[in-house]
């Protein structure tokens, strides 16, 4: 008879910021990084399978979930949060780890691999990007993110979630069963307006470094995942695959930006098969 999964919830003070982290399982380590307006809770459906053979650490990123909201949004920068993750690995006595990141978490996973390559053994990037290469486009995106941050602070979390769920990016998610959509909505509503605003201003695509020019130097194996209906991120993933030395790409049929929610079984299989293959290479 299979034993029940034990998930330990812990707080770690990392470079002065208090993080909420969920830990489960034993084996090769896997660090899980959620997307904007999410939390570590997005990964819970996968823990019963993944924690059977892996040591999982799922993190609430700054301004999200139960992790602190920094007073200065610059504290949320990719560079600072990557340094926090390295400190977390130290606290967990983990030298190198596989990293799985979704959307904003995918950008952070790539940033961690660029800034601390000695800490990353493999990457899974779902619906993510290396940032924006053009400086003018970065500035425009930073302005847009700043305007959205101000709107969240002004109108509150409920109005933001209503806006967020109706973006074209998430159109295919409207087909999900009502209980799944409600669970996702509750994860988003559990965030704080000031936290999401700080994250946008400090960690948004417009203010992070662009890693496009450095992709050819990334030596670790990378699994890229994009939903077939998410045409923008399919194109980004194809460009990334062409530049990365050891990348594979899975375009998931009939899925949009939220592959892990829209096609969870296939998503879990892609992740498991990739990580199993990297274990054999280690």
Image (spheres, grey):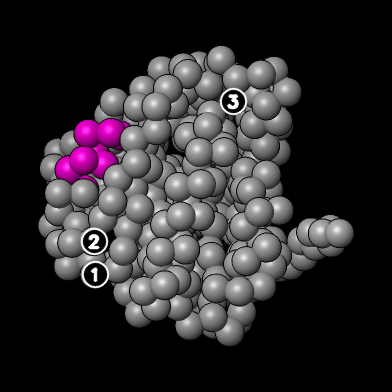
Q: Quadrant of residue 110?
A: bottom left
What is the CA distance from the residue labelled 3 to the residue labelled 2? 37 Å
| Residue that label 1 marks | 219
Magenta run includes residue 187:
no
Residue 243: x percent and y percent? 15, 53
Q: Quadrant of residue 61?
A: bottom right
Residue tagged 3 = 161
Position in image of residue 155 (x %, y %): 59, 24
Q: Give the distance between the C-alpha atoms of the residues marked 2 and 1, in whole angstroms.
A: 7 Å
The x and y percentages for residue 50 are: 62, 57
Position of 264 relative to 69 (above/below): above
Instruction: Tell me, yes or no, whether the two marked residues, 2 and 1, touch with CB atoms within 8 Å.
Output: yes
Q: Earlier in the sequence, mark 1 or mark 3?
A: 3
Between marks 2 and 1 in the image, the one whose residue lies nearer the viewer: 2
Location of residue 222 with respect to 89 vertically, above or below: above
Describe residue 35's horizontal placement relative to residue 117 as left or right.
right
Residue in the foreground of this view, choosing between 99 and 249: 249
Magenta stretch bounds: 233-240
Q: Earlier in the sequence, mark 3 or mark 2?
A: 3
> Which of the pair 208/186 is nearer the observer?
186
Q: Secondary structure at mark 3?
A: helix
Query: Sequence order check: which comes first, mark 2 or mark 1?
Result: 1
Majority secondary structure of the magenta segment? helix
Q: Could you tell me which residue is drawn at 38 percent across and 50 percent down?
A: 125
């Amino acid at each position: 008879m299979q034993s029940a999964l034990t998930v330990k919830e812990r707080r770690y003070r990392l470079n002065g910021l208090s993080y909420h982290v969920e830990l489960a399982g034993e084996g090769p380590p896997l660090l899980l990084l959620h997307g904007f307006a999410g939390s570590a809770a997005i990964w819970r459906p996968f823990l019963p399978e993944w924690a059977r053979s892996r040591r999982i650490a799922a993190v609430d990123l700054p301004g999200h979930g139960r992790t602190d909201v920094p007073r200065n949004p610059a504290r949320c920068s990719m560079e600072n949060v990557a340094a926090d993750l390295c400190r977390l690995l130290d606290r967990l006595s983990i030298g190198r780890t596989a990293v799985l990141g979704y959307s904003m978490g995918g950008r952070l996973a790539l940033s961690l691999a660029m800034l601390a390559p000695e800490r990353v053994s493999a990457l899974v990037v779902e619906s993510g990007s290396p940032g924006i290469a053009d400086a003018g486009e970065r500035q425009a995106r930073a302005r847009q993110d700043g305007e959205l941050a101000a709107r969240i602070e002004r109108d509150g979390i409920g109005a933001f979630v209503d806006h967020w769920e109706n973006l074209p990016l998430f159109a295919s998610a409207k087909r999900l069963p009502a209980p799944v959509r409600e669970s996702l909505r509750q994860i988003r509503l559990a965030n704080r307006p000031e936290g999401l605003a700080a994250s946008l201003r400090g960690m948004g695509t417009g203010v992070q470094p662009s890693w496009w020019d450095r992709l050819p130097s990334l030596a670790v194996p990378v699994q890229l995942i994009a939903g077939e209906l998410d045409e923008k991120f399919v194109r980004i993933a194809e460009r990334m695959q062409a530049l990365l030395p050891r990348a594979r790409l899975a375009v998931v049929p009939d899925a949009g930006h939220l592959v892990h929610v829209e096609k969870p079984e296939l998503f879990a299989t892609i992740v498991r098969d990739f990580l199993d293959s990297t274990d054999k290479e280690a």
